[in-house]
Image (tube, rainbow, N blue to C red):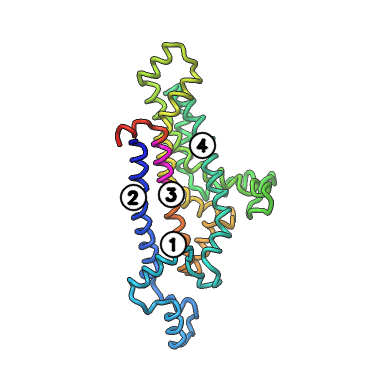
Amino acid sequence: MGRYLFIAKRLALAIPLLFGIVLLVFLILKITPGDPARLIVGLRASEPELQLVREQLGLNDPAIVQYFRYVGDVFSGNLGYSFKSREAVSSIIAERLPVTIWLLGFGALLSLVISVPLAILSARAPDRPFDHATRGFSLVALAMPSFWVGIILILTVALPTGWFPVGGFGETPAEHLRSIALPAFTLALSIAPLQVRSLRASIIAVLGTEHVTTAKSLGVPRSRIMSKFVLRNAAPPTVSILALNIGYLLFGAVVVETTFALPGIGQGIVLAARQRDIPTIQGYTLLFAVVVVLVFLIADILTSIADPRLEVES
């Protein structure tokens, strides 16, 4: 029962948080320098033309009226229209979102493929040569900027071999995989070091507990001890670390997509910022913020399932 109460509390906290996010995104339009109407009609527009656009956009209404109208539009799926292309922001996001989902999904998966084996092998022989090498790798990888790693991979892997394209996303699933391989590896390399250090420390702590010592004395195979007792108890901190780094992943997606010319959300943010396309920036910002909230919520739920102690603590 305590686990369900824990999840219910997290769900209840997410609702006011989402309303606060919508408020902050709405304020982007208010604090951004410049006249939105002039961004639409141009610098040479006359005052009557500006007044007509302001009336159409509802900019002459009180701020509180504009906010509640914006909230209603957001929850009905209307994120406004681009100042530049006059296309619906939701359509722009829907067009670019699959690329970013591929990048983030494969990036997170690769980060686990890299970090979990390294952490297990390192924790089974702490302060040995392999452990020192793993920690050294983590420090070096953590210090390398994503754009630099991406450029090095393009110069040393993509261009010499021709196996991977240096830009674009392709048309078929096979082309998508080839296009996303190096960007996903670049993104994975930026967060894997933190996961290695977190999971390694958790595994070492769990290996020293009494129930693991008892299992060893009873002759339980090492592989079963690791899968049944150790990893399950060591996983919650790693899930939390991965959730905490979702914001870094999203920022990394902006850098990586720009480096590899991927037509995703990250590249769209850069383009919208250059054009001062405020509704599109608002849509991207709202999407990123909602994704972060949902990821934290999912991480809390997974942690409550993996860690039975939450049942008692709740």
Horizontal and vertical percent for residue 260? 59, 53
Q: Earlier in the sequence, mark 3 or mark 1?
A: 1
- Type of residue at label 2? Leu
Q: Which mark is residue 237?
A: none
Name the element at disc 1.
helix
Which residue position holds label 1? 75
Residue 22, picture quadrant? bottom left
Residue 61 shown left or right of residue 173 in the figure: left
Q: Closer to us: mark 1 or mark 4? A: 1
* Label 2 – label 1 distance at C-alpha: 18 Å
Asked if the residue at tag 4 contacts the one at tag 1, i.e. Cβ–Cβ closer than 8 Å, the answer is no
Which residue position holds label 2? 13
Up/down of 8 relative to 310, above or below: below
Up/down of 130 relative to 162, above or below: above
Horizontal and vertical percent for residue 293? 41, 50
Q: Which mark is residue 112?
A: 4
Q: Closer to us: mark 3 or mark 1? A: 1
Q: Is residue 16 magenta?
A: no
